[in-house]
Amino acid sequence: MRVFIAISPRWSGGIFSHLKGILTSGYVPNDIHILVYGTQRFFDAIGPMDKNVETIVDNSMSMNPIMMYLWRSRNIPKLLEIYSTDVHFSVQGNLGKWSNDKIKHVVMSRNLQPHLVVERKRTPLYKFSRIRNEVLHRTLKSGFQRADGVINLTEYAREIIQSEGVHLKRSVVIPHGASEKFRNHTIVKRNLSKSPVILYVSDFMEYKFQWEVVRGVNIVRKNTGIDFQVHLVGCKSSGGWKYLERVLFDLNYPKWIKITEHIPYNEIHKVYQTADMFIFASTVENFPNILLEAMASGLPIAYSNRRPMTDILGNDGITFEPEDPQTIADAFEELLDDDFRYQCALGAYNRALRYSWERTARETFDFLKEVYES
């Protein structure tokens, strides 16, 4: 069976983690030949892949989203024919219009924000990202409806899609895995450092609420007198950065906040090891890879009280309302209890053991075969 995967020059961290997890660790079955079409930059970043994976380099693809869409519409149907494709696996979620019905199409449900009205409206109408999400809402629904198979990362995501009246011909829930590098050096700490580090890894988007995290930690610093430090890791170019800048200005740019814009994926596990606690304040996720990485790192976690985060971590963490800084402060005050904090961290670590890339790869390739043979 020949499977074709096209990766545009603009890929997300979730897509990168997913493909690295299933294509680079010897999990590709011998009876499947994978063709990955992408830029040299992507292949350099992902590193050596399994023997059954063939790479096709094309550095001519545009980074412009509109040009990229037009390129995919014109060229991918031709490429599927040229490379004698049996299954087209769209890991980025988009499914164009194809003329060859003999080729099976499997699409991943990866981006949940376009499907939730309240989350789309967080971005102003005049912003390109708002227009993009409105367009994506329509194109993704159409793709899910027409695809021969849909892979959902969580049951929650499948419920949201079906609630919009989308009939899925064949669907499955296959969560992401956690890389072993996060588990390899895990030490579940019993005691806090003198100046405890609270880590948050996420780009500064409108639904990530880093600014409310800073407000919440500022409250708990005043209430307890503990010298909490906040380390924010993420890209500043996203829409939530302006909200954080206002809060930083109001607080006179405090020295207890450290911001790191970019850390390579092969180094990020070391940052988790420097933290005493972790926070995840996102209001919308399909599958929160970052939350899973923090769990696998053995960190006590304060996290958003929204699904699917609550499905994944459950009671092995403390929840808060991400738009209310007082509840964030309350969560960290609860985590000051040594026994409770230790049990949360240990429970989160054990939960993360359920998620492995070997399982993800096996279930993914089994589903691709199922769709192909259906």
Image: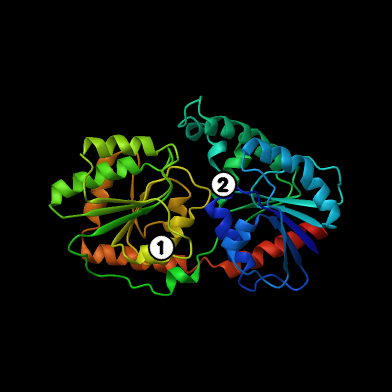
Q: Is residue 108 above or below residue 212?
A: below
In this rendering, the label closer to the viewer, 2 or 1? 1
Quadrant (top left/top right/bottom left/bottom right) for the C terminus: bottom right
Residue count near mark 1 (Cα–Cα under 10 Å), binned few <14, some 14–19, many ≥20? many
Q: Observer-nearest residue: 76 or 223? A: 76
Q: Position of residue 88 (x, y in %)?
A: 76, 53
Do we see residue 96 in this rendering? no
| Extreme residue in the top direction | 126
Q: Is residue 240 above or below residue 121?
A: below
Q: Residue at x 48, y 32 (%)?
A: 118
> Quadrant location of residue 368?
bottom right
Number of numbered callouts drawn: 2
Mark linked to residue 157: 2
Query: Is residue 135 shown left or right of residue 267?
Result: right
Residue count near mark 2 (Cα–Cα under 10 Å), binned few <14, some 14–19, many ≥20? many
Looking at the picture, which amino acid does disc 1 mark?
A: Met
Q: Residue at x 78, y 45 (%)?
A: 75
- Mark 2 and mark 1 lie on one chain; the one further toward the N terminus is 2
Q: Is residue 64 above or below residue 276?
A: above
Q: Which residue is mark 1?
A: 295
Q: Residue at x 59, y 70 (%)?
A: 358
- Mark 2 to mark 1 CA distance (whole Å): 21 Å
Looking at the picture, which amino acid does disc 2 mark?
A: Ala
> Quadrant location of residue 296?
bottom left
Query: Is residue 260 shown left or right of residue 222?
Result: right
Q: Position of residue 270 (x, y in %)?
A: 38, 66
